[in-house]
Image (tube, grey):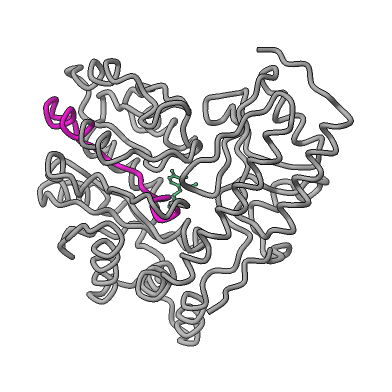
Amino acid sequence: MPFNFDTIDRHHTHAIKHELYRNQPVLPMWVADMDLASPPCVQDALQSRSAHPVYGYTHPWPGLNNAVVNWCQQQYQWAIDPSWIVWLPGVVPSFNLAIDAFARGGRVLVQEPNYPPLRKAAAFRGATVIKLAVTTSNPAGWDWSTLEQELAHPDCHLMILCNPMNPHGLMLGQNELQRLAALCREHQVLLCSDEIHCDLILESALRHCPAGSLPDIADHSITLMAASKTFNVAGLGCSFAIIPNGDLRRQLQSNGQDLMPHPNVMGLLAAEAAFNDGLDWLLALRAHLKSNRDQVASVIGELDGLRYLPAPATFLAWVESDLAPGEAMTRFTEAGIMPSDGKDFGDPYSVRLNFGTGRETLDQALEQLQSYWRQNRPNSSR
Ligand SMILES: Cc1ncc(COP(=O)(O)O)c(C=O)c1O
């Protein structure tokens, strides 16, 4: 069935992507949601539920858990038990909860640069963040001896991995994950893996490997997933954790008791519909995003002072620069494009461009950039 990946006009829907820069003449290409319609199966499920006029607290149901179990089996060859699934109102609250439950007062390892809420979470929860520098030149992106040294620290009880990584779009291969899992096990460090982007792998030859599927770490792991990024339902407040170890699961749940909101009923329904019936749409979406990504790479490659290595995952292009700190951001804005500022991710030389949009919008954005660069050639500073 052909699917439509044209830009949907989101003005007048209070979308934060548009609202934040409402009075500025810029194309919003920042926050990580797409300008594309959710799959028809998701729209149908939501419309049919919204016809019932009561929208009260809703308990996750067995068919919903089965949808996740089947998805994990089909997509990652990971056999999970439905009882391992904990539904939560979002991935950001989930990793914050994990810090509360398992690392308060201790040290928490995270990659850097990284998604801003992941950079900030430890400090917000009374823990110390330890930043592990990653680069775009190496698949795992970090220095293994530094990693091991940090894992061995007596106060390090938790690593929060972001895989695939936001902002780089890099993903860890099975061998690297295996190595990480063995080190975490050796040093008794809990691995909480934010895998919200794991179904947006744009290369058909690559497979995502969930952290919890590795025998070395399964019993000491929390894998965080959601339908939100993949099926463009991020406003519906819903995600899930997969926690094979019953003690860890109960501890996380008890820390969230009377604190975490119930997951949104529409988010639960969207996840069920997406995982049950959304695969054809997702395959078509990946092809669309891959073509967008390659177009971004071909245009950025011609702009002096910028570098973009097409990454295997996500709809986010991490554009690095040789310009002065903040200059890439200023130039994109002057060209009429609003990316995310790399400084918020820990790298003021870079910007993150969201290419999860229709082709016409992307082409317009890239033409604006080309034309601006033609008129304003930069001086490289690095
Ligand atoms: C790595 C990562 N984790 C979490 C989130 C947000 O998760 P949620 O909206 O479910 O809290 C994002 C959104 O961009 C993200 O990129």
Question: Which of 261/208 is in front?
Answer: 208
Q: Residue furthest top?
A: 382
Relative to 48, is 75 above or below? above
What residue sits 78% from the left and 39% below the top? 369
Q: How many numbered marks does the figure carry?
A: 0
Image position of 209 (left or right of 251): right
The image quadrant of residue 67 is: bottom left
Question: Which of 367/197 is in front?
Answer: 367
Query: Residue 66, position in %: x, y?
Result: 24, 72
Relative to 204, is 42 above or below? below
Image position of 24 (left or right of 215): right
Q: Is residue 211 magenta?
A: no
Query: Residue 204, position in %: x, y?
Result: 42, 55
The image quadrant of residue 299 is: top right
What residue sits 62% from the left and 23% below the top? 349
Relative to 326, is 252 above or below? below
Image position of 159 (left or right of 347): left
Question: Which of 224/369 is in front?
Answer: 369
What residue sits 17% from the left and 60% below the top? 79
Q: Quadrant of the C terminus?
A: top right
Q: Which residues are magenta?
A: 180-200
Relative to 237, is 208 above or below? above
Query: Residue 280, position in %: x, y?
Result: 45, 72
Q: Residue furthest right?
A: 375
Question: Which of 296/191 is in front?
Answer: 296
Query: Residue 101, position in %: x, y?
Result: 23, 39
Q: Is residue 197 magenta?
A: yes
What residue sits 62% from the left and 66% below the top? 5
